[in-house]
Image: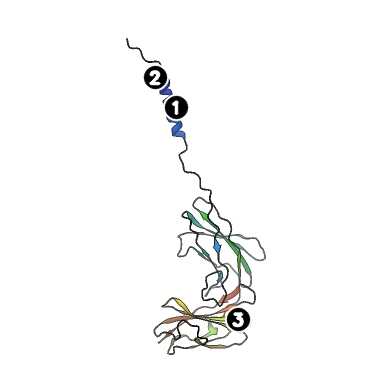
Amino acid sequence: MITKPQHIFPIVLLTIALLAWIGCTDKSTPTDTTPPGKPALLAAPPDSAWNEMGTDAIPGEDWIELVWFRGSESDLRGYQIYRSTPPSEILTLLATKILGRDECDTVYQDSTVEIGLRYKYQITAFDQAGNESATSDTVDYMLILKPSPENLTSPRGEIQVRRPVFSWISTGESLENHLRVYDVLEDRTVWVSSGHDPFSSPHSVLYNDDGRATESLLIPSHEYWWRVDREGTELRSGSESNWVSFTVR
């Protein structure tokens, strides 16, 4: 007759209980509660600036463009854009920008604005876990009427001279006019001419009359765009005309 050891059964029960406890232990990674850093929303640049990066009017449309720097977080998912609509000063959610859904993750164009109203903006960043950052600094901007396309009279189309005269008509509803010339092939601004009194209309300005252009003479076979920006009488207000194109032959 074989006698079974009496201590085996308790050991088996203890082993089963231990395995059950291990199986029920939470093996998930810790919950991410760290929000992204506060984003930097860029204020409006001076109208005479060669680098236009910042909250500003845009050519062609009566819209306001916002620009900010992208955060360095590896789990960054997108941005929330907040805006106050006059006469209210309360900022409410305007749009959500998910990274990778369009060509530029750090630009937003607000098409739901009206001329003559000042809008305030803030943005926040959020990550894959849904953590939202602190709000950015507040920026603001107001659109004014832009020059009509027919008021930008010349140059247009094909021209034969390398120092053309730029002619346009303006009204007295702005502080200054700023002429901007852009080389399409080189993808760069080649001249900004500022300080034109809107009351001294019509304007005729010889290219590079101040000697500040990066191309002293325009280059044959290059296409150029030019426009006129109007600086408002209030800070951070203005407009940008449509681009007009011409080619030097």
Q: Residues within 10 Å of mark 1 (few under 14, many from 20)?
A: few
| Residue at the spot of label 2 | 8
Determine which of the numbered discs, if any, sits on residue 162 in the image.
none
Q: Is residue 93 above or below residue 231?
A: above
Q: Disc 3 on helix, strand or loop? A: strand
How far apart are labels 3 and 1 at the CA level? 83 Å
Q: Disc 2 on helix, strand or loop? A: helix
Determine which of the numbered discs, if any, sits on residue 17 in the image.
1
Q: Residue at x 48, y 83 (%)?
A: 213
| Residue at the spot of label 3 | 176
**Of discs 2 and 1, which sits in the foreground?**
2
The kind of residue tagged 2 is: Ile
**Badge 2 or badge 1: first in the primary sequence:** 2
Q: Residue furthest right?
A: 87
Q: Disc 1 on helix, strand or loop? A: helix
The kind of residue tagged 1 is: Ala
Q: Residues within 10 Å of mark 2 (few under 14, many from 20)?
A: few
The answer to which quarter of the image holds residue 63 is: bottom right
Q: Residue furthest top?
A: 1
**Badge 3 or badge 1: first in the primary sequence:** 1
How far apart are labels 2 and 1 at the CA level? 15 Å
Q: Is residue 51 above or below residue 166?
A: above
**Of discs 3 and 2, which sits in the foreground?**
2
State the image coordinates of residue 70 (x, y, percent, origin top left). Answer: 50, 61
State the image coordinates of residue 124 (x, y, percent, origin top left). Answer: 56, 58
Instruction: Kindly indicate whether the residue at mark 2 contacts the one at mark 3 (C-beta within 8 angstroms).
Output: no
How far apart are labels 3 and 2 at the CA level? 96 Å
The answer to which quarter of the image holds residue 216 is: bottom left
